[in-house]
Image: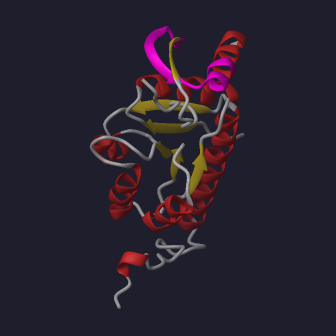
Amino acid sequence: MECDCVNCGAPDARRYELTVRNTDHDEVPLCEQCHAAITEELAEE
Amino acid sequence: MFQDINVLHVDDDPAIRDLTAEFLETVDDSISVRSEADPSTVPTRIDAEPIDCVVSDYRMPELDGLELCRRIRDDRPWFPFILFTSVRGEEVVEAAMDAGVTDYLRKETGTHHYTLLANRITLAVSRRRAVGRLQEAGALPPEWPPRTARADDVQD
């Protein structure tokens, strides 16, 4: 099912698992570019 | 030395709450973020906690960001309030200004907008603190700047 990216609002989001601040978030709707940018940024921290 | 800034971030999405807190505190270590899922509790939290600025999403299920801003403005005309949204359109910007937001920032692809948001928060809080210091010194009246009429206050 199509949904909007929660980070930028783009309509072509897919659902990803994301761990932020030791919290696992399931099925976070993100576009490909935001997912790449966020995972890269989180990996650097 | 710059004082620390306590931000209350309001968003119904738990992943965005965590991401916003993580990135804001990483790009500016003077910023400390508290998170809130329920916008209706925000006015009470502002009264009870040392919060310097509210950052709010626009679209939320029970209460949208603009209505939240109006509720805060009822008693706190100059409290720093930043609308942080992916919703685009000139009508949103106009509605945000009419509701009395301090600033409006559109979410973009990637993570750069968190750096912009940190800068806007620092600017809004610095201005508010400067005005507060001048008011305490008697250099400005307590109700400065004077409240301007909102569009919905204007009668035909």
- In which quadrant will I find the N terminus of chain B? top right
On screen, residue A30 above or below B138: above
Q: Identify the magenta region.
A: A19-36
In the image, is B19 to the left or to the right of A45? left
- In which quadrant will I find the C terminus of chain B? bottom left
Residue at horizontal 46 percent and vertical 37 percent from the top: B9
Expressed as whole percent of the image width and height from the top left, the position of residue B102 reads 54, 58
On screen, residue B72 above or below B84: below
Return the residue found at the far front: A1
Magenta stretch containing residue B63, yes or no?
no
Return the residue found at the far bottom: B156
Front residue (pair B60, B129): B60
**Applied colour scheme:** secondary structure
Expressed as whole percent of the image width and height from the top left, the position of residue B15 reads 46, 22
Residue at horizontal 61 percent and vertical 30 percent from the top: B24
Task: Quadrant for residue B69, please give it.
Answer: bottom left
Number of numbered discs overlaid on the protein picture: 0
Magenta stretch containing residue A21, yes or no?
yes
Expressed as whole percent of the image width and height from the top left, the position of residue A30 reads 55, 24
On screen, residue B34 above or below A38: below
Residue at horizontal 42 percent and vertical 35 percent from the top: B11
Residue at horizontal 52 percent and vertical 44 percent from the top: B85
